[in-house]
Image (cartoon, rainbow, N blue to C red):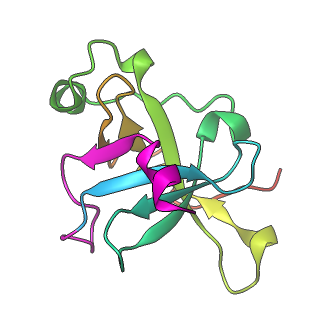
Amino acid sequence: MTLSAVATLPLLSMTEALPGFPGHRDYVLVTADGDGRLFWLQSMAPEGPRFLAIDPGRYFPDYAPALPPAVCADLELDDSAEARLYCLVTVPAEGPAAATANLRAPLVVNPANWRSSQVVLLDGSHPIRRPLRR
């Protein structure tokens, strides 16, 4: 990806760094597959981390976690229904067929200002490792 292509993407500003990556708060979300089913959450730092992510609604249509009011306030979301959610994906050594999505800790994005935060949900009904395969 060229620098000019990155410049046209919205900059996600994390209110808190992702666990384990304290020096990285600015990311872009880049499509990884061309059809919007897979994304790269890419740090803007030259040697920063990159995570595979999905829009959970495309894989799990019933996924509608209750977002804590404090998170909505922090992201300046007037209505939690306006939030965009993304879930980080783990691809284990067994390969892509065994990939799982973390539904317990979605990335919540306010599309009006691109403030974002990873939220650990207290609701135990959302698994940390939900298989992507149906």
Task: Locate residue 131: give its quadrant.
Answer: bottom right
The residue lying furthest to the top in this view is 78
Residue 129 x, y percent position in the rendering: 57, 61
Please say whether residue 54 is one of the residues in the magenta stretch.
Answer: no
The residue lying furthest to the front in this view is 4
Residue 87 seen in this snapshot:
yes
Residue 63 x, y percent position in the rendering: 58, 33
Q: Is residue 125 left or right of residue 77?
A: right
Identify which residue, 14 or 3, lies in the foreground.
Answer: 3
Q: Is residue 100 left or right of residue 124?
A: right
Identify which residue, 48 or 122, lies in the foreground.
Answer: 48
Name the residue: 33% across, 13% down.
79
Name the residue: 52% across, 28% down.
64
Segment tinted magenta in the rendering:
1-23
Residue 121 seen in this snapshot:
no
Name the residue: 24% across, 26% down.
72
Please say whether residue 12 is one of the residues in the magenta stretch.
Answer: yes
Task: Locate residue 80: give its quadrant.
Answer: top left
Residue 71 x, y percent position in the rendering: 22, 33
Identify which residue, 83 or 23, lies in the foreground.
Answer: 23
Task: Locate residue 59: give its quadrant.
Answer: top right
Q: Is residue 119 left or right of residue 103?
A: left
Quadrant for the N terminus, please: bottom right
The majority secondary structure of the magenta stretch comes to: loop
